[in-house]
Image (spheres, grey):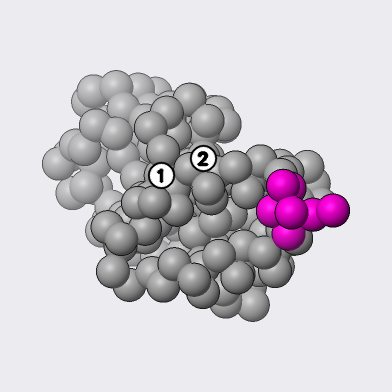
Amino acid sequence: MRALAEAAEATARVYFTGGATAVLIGWRPSTIDVDIKIVPEDDRLFRAIPLIKENLQINVELACPADFIPVPPGWEDRSPFIASEGRLFFHHFDLYAQALAKVERSHALDIGDVEEMVRQGLVEPARAWQYFQAIEADLYRFPAVDANSFRRAVEQAFGRPPDTAQ
């Protein structure tokens, strides 16, 4: 965060996703890459990333859940604040979007992350279902996502939808 902030000449927000969130919150000791989204996009920050990657020996990817699944408006307000450094404000990308993107991908590590998010109370199953139902109609915009498989994966991760759980 400090290294990126040193390159910032303007105020921006940096949103961490995936393994970076897992490490910063503390349920994983390490990650193979740091996924970020910078708002507003800033060429100076993008140009600083290769040097940061080399100096810190980390992989940085420009990726967030919105690249893989629909994310409802207002995700910025649902993104927990981490810290500020210089002109940059760091947040975790909307935790429900992260959880659903992980469920959609369904890798073992991702499912473990979602289980930990639920265990720690960061994501509530009923709210995850509400979030999924809010994005379900827009899944057609993401041709790589099979809506039926995604719904089954959400049910496996969060149980039956609240309206049919009885």
Q: Does the CB distance between marks 1 and 2 fall below 8 Å?
A: yes
- Seen at 42% across and 28% down, the residue is 74
Answer whether residue 162 is magenta in the image.
yes
**Up-down: is 97 above or below 50?**
above
Give coordinates of residue 53: x percent, y percent: 35, 60
Q: How crowded is mark 1: few (under 14 residues within 10 Å), some or many (20 or more)?
A: many
**Label 1, label 2: how far apart the Cα atoms are:** 9 Å
Give whichever of 56, 164 is nearer the camera: 164
- Seen at 22% across and 47% down, the residue is 46
**What is the three-letter code of the residue carrying label 1?**
Val
Viewer can see residue 18? no
Query: What residue is disc 2 on?
Result: 94
**What is the three-letter code of the residue carrying label 2?**
Asp
Can you say which quadrant of the picture contains the N terminus? Answer: top left
Location of residue 143 (image quadrant): bottom left
Give coordinates of residue 120: x percent, y percent: 80, 46
Give whichever of 143, 80 is nearer the camera: 143
Which contiguous range is marked in magenta?
160-166
SS for callout 2: loop
| Residue 56 located left or right of residue 81 | left
Outermost residue, bottom direction?
108
**Up-down: is 127 above or below 47?**
above
Give whichever of 125, 79 is nearer the camera: 125
- Seen at 69% across and 53% down, the residue is 161
Location of residue 156 (image quadrant): bottom right
Give coordinates of residue 107: x percent, y percent: 57, 76
SS for callout 1: loop
Query: What residue is disc 1 on?
Result: 71
The label shown at residue 96 is none
